[in-house]
Image (cartoon, coloured by chain):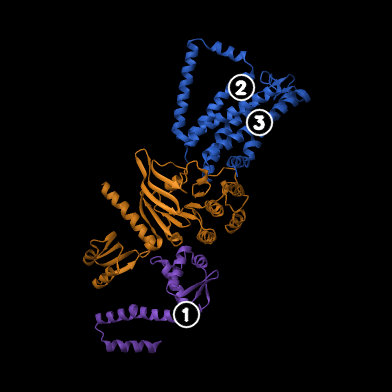
Chain colours: A purple, B orange, C blue
């Protein structure tokens, strides 16, 4: 079945990531309403409890907040918080791994910096 | 009361053959469960006992807090849709719907008819003349429209194509969101339903081998690939569920790796790839039954 | 809703099986006899009436095969199934008895022998009693036939094919022994004179304990039957 989810990782985390991406890419504006957990569940064909868990993860982090009887909204300042978090992740995921791999291949820090500049020019 | 089904030490034997052996688990209210396992593992037998259509040889069984046998307080709340369901020869689809409406207290006629349209079912056609897929769709319609507090689907989609199966999952999630109930999906096609499940129960050779939250199982197991000696070193003392040598390499599936394990694997230069829920269960049910065969020799 | 009434409705959905088929069989046999009687010059007696009683036996066998697994699949109790089905058999037998009686009235009072001296519904001996007695005879025999079929089907459901074979074998042996004993002690004549000394109504009454026994045993077996 053409699934949108990756079954090797917890789905609630993937739901949270998708909402985060939407906020970072400004598809979801701050102070705008987020789809309900049931809407998420139906759209992604996943269990509603799992969808709720993903949304609640973001509520706990203050990215989303509940308006009683209305639904979930994106908190103001959420985007800045997420950007900061992602930058940290970027460092862990890409920079650290890159430096380690460079060491393995005998690339000096100077050479590495030049390679990054070259990559920047190309894009 | 949150426990909809409580099973303790359930055992079913036919003469000397034990088909269900000391199975215990409970089902909570308003969750979607997957009862998974290979064909012939004993899933259908367990569901038949929960619905009092078969009798247990020993063990304790409670459904909605009571024994289900000849108990209308319990039976009225159960809808069990099975692949092998028999219908009277002369019945048409509409007859099945009307009779179901008589016996399931929450049955929603309008919803049933909208499902009939969704699945393109010929209302006036005799059940006997339906294709395998249509027959499955009739079961799905009754199962969904009955809105029973405990709804059990046993391999409900035999003969249904991908579009119809997807339609079933869509309708199930939609209706469940609006009318929460306890749903049990029993199947050997794990991949398709795994995302719908909140909790997973795996039966293999009549025994319970997994009873866990679906999310907790995802990412729980990983495949470790690398030079055989290094992999062997890494996996000693760990819960290894399968190993496949490949030239000088070894690929082992391991359950429950911690973050320290992961960084150690990285240091050793081993490749780690997480496996899906489906793969995990396939590994578990394969390895255990193979192990049995070896032991029997 | 009440489940016994629900099961009644479930059976009634199959009007062909319960209502139309037995009468199509009975009436087509009747019309064939009518044609024959038309060409025959003398009064004609036929046993065609038996078909509807045999049909009740067939219903007893088939109904369980057709509807019991379906009823269990609908989360129904075996007890409710038994009583609902029994009620259906009682109502059917009662309606059929009334229809048979009305036809016998037509045959004797309104159109003597259907105009062709055919005795189809009005039988000597069988229809000797009062109106109530005649109705009762039909009713009791039909119900007996139904439960006879029903118990055979129940044995099959409860004990499977082997159970039915064993039952048949045991019955065969019992009847053989009984037959031998009857011959040995010269009881046959006594038996026939006993039959002859009783009216059809009295004999019909004698089926009742057996009918009740069949019903009770069927109930007992169904309670322990599985899918």
Q: Could you tell me which chain the residue with mark 2 belongs to?
A: C
The residue that label 1 is drawn on is A25
Q: Is residue A55 left or right of residue A87?
A: right
| Mark 1: secondary structure | loop
Determine which of the numbered discs, if any, sits on residue C216 in the image.
Answer: none
Who's the residue at 47% across and 31% down the image? Answer: C164
Residue B222 versus residue C20: which sits nearer the camera?
B222
Please tell me how many numbered marks the rendered image carries.
3
Q: Could you tell me which chain the residue with mark 3 belongs to?
A: C
The residue that label 2 is drawn on is C204
Q: Position of residue B28 (x, y in %)?
A: 44, 55
Q: Is residue B290 visible in the rendered structure shown here?
A: yes
Residue A54 versus residue C178: which sits nearer the camera?
A54
The residue that label 3 is drawn on is C94
Q: Position of residue C29 (x, y in %)?
A: 67, 29
Q: Could you tell me which chain the residue with mark 1 belongs to?
A: A
Who's the residue at 52% across and 49% down the image? Answer: B77
> Quick one: label 3, few (<14), some, or many (20+) residues within 10 Å?
some
């Amino acid at each position: 079945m053409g699934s949108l989810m990756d079954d090797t990782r917890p789905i609630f985390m993937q739901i949270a990531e998708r909402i985060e991406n939407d906020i970072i890419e400004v598809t979801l504006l701050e102070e705008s309403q987020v789809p309900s957990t049931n809407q998420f569940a139906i759209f992604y064909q996943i269990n509603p409890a799992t969808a709720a868990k993903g949304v609640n993860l973001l509520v706990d982090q203050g990215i989303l907040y509940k308006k009683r009887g209305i639904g979930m909204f994106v908190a103001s300042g959420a985007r800045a918080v997420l950007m900061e978090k992602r930058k940290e992740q970027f460092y862990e995921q890409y920079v650290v791994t890159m430096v380690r791999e460079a060491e393995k291949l005998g690339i000096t820090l100077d050479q590495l910096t030049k390679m990054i500049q070259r990559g920047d020019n190309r894009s | 009361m949150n426990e909809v089904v409580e099973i303790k030490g359930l055992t079913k034997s036919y003469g000397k053959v034990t088909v269900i052996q000391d199975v215990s688990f409970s089902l909570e209210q308003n969750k979607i469960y997957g009862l998974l396992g290979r064909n012939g593992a004993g899933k259908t037998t367990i569901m038949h006992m929960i619905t009092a259509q078969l009798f247990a040889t020993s063990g304790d069984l409670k459904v909605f807090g009571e024994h289900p046998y000849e108990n209308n307080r319990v039976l009225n709340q159960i809808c069990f849709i099975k692949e092998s369901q028999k219908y009277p020869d002369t019945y048409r689809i509409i007859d099945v719907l009307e009779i179901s409406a008589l016996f399931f207290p929450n049955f929603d006629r309008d919803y049933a008819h909208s499902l009939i349209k969704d699945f393109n079912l010929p209302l006036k056609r005799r059940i006997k003349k339906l294709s395998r897929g249509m027959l499955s769709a009739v079961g799905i319609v009754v199962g969904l429209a009955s809105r029973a507090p405990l709804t059990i689907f046993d391999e409900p989609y035999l003969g249904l194509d991908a579009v119809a199966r997807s339609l079933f999952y869509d309708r199930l999630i939609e209706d469940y969101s609006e009318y929460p109930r306890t749903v049990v999906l029993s199947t050997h096609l794990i991949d398709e339903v795994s995302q719908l499940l909140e909790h997973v129960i795996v039966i293999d050779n009549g025994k319970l081998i997994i009873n866990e939250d679906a999310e907790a199982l995802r990412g729980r197991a990983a495949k470790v690939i690398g030079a055989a000696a290094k992999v062997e070193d890494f996996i000693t003392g760990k819960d290894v569920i399968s190993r496949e040598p490949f030239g000088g390499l070894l690929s082992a599936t391991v359950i429950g790796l911690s973050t320290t394990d992961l960084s150690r694997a990285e240091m050793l230069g081993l490749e780690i790839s997480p496996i899906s829920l489906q793969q995990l269960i396939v590994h578990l049910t394969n390895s255990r039954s193979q192990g049995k065969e070896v032991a029997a020799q | 809703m009440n489940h016994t009434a629900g099961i009644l409705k479930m059976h009634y959905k199959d009007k062909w099986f319960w209502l139309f088929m037995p009468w199509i069989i009975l009436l087509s046999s009747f019309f064939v006899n009518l044609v024959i009687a038309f060409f025959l010059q003398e009064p004609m007696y036929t046993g065609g009436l038996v078909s509807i009683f045999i049909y009740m036996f067939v219903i007893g066998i088939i109904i369980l095969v057709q509807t019991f697994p379906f009823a269990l699949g609908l989360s129904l109790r075996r007890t409710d199934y038994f009583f609902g089905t029994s009620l259906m058999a009682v109502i059917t037998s009662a309606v059929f008895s009334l229809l048979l009686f009305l036809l016998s009235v037509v045959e004797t009072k309104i159109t003597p022998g259907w105009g062709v001296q055919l005795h189809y519904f009005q039988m000597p001996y069988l229809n000797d009693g009062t109106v109530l007695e005649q109705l009762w005879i039909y009713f009791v025999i039909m119900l007996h036939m139904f439960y006879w079929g029903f118990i055979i089907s129940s044995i099959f459901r409860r004990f499977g094919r082997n159970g039915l074979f064993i039952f048949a074998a045991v019955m065969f042996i019992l009847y053989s022994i009984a037959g031998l004993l009857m011959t040995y002690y010269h009881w046959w004549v006594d038996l026939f004179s006993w039959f002859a000394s009783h009216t059809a109504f009295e004999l019909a009454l004698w089926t009742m304990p057996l009918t009740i026994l069949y019903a009770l045993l069927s109930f007992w077996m169904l309670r322990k039957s599985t899918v």
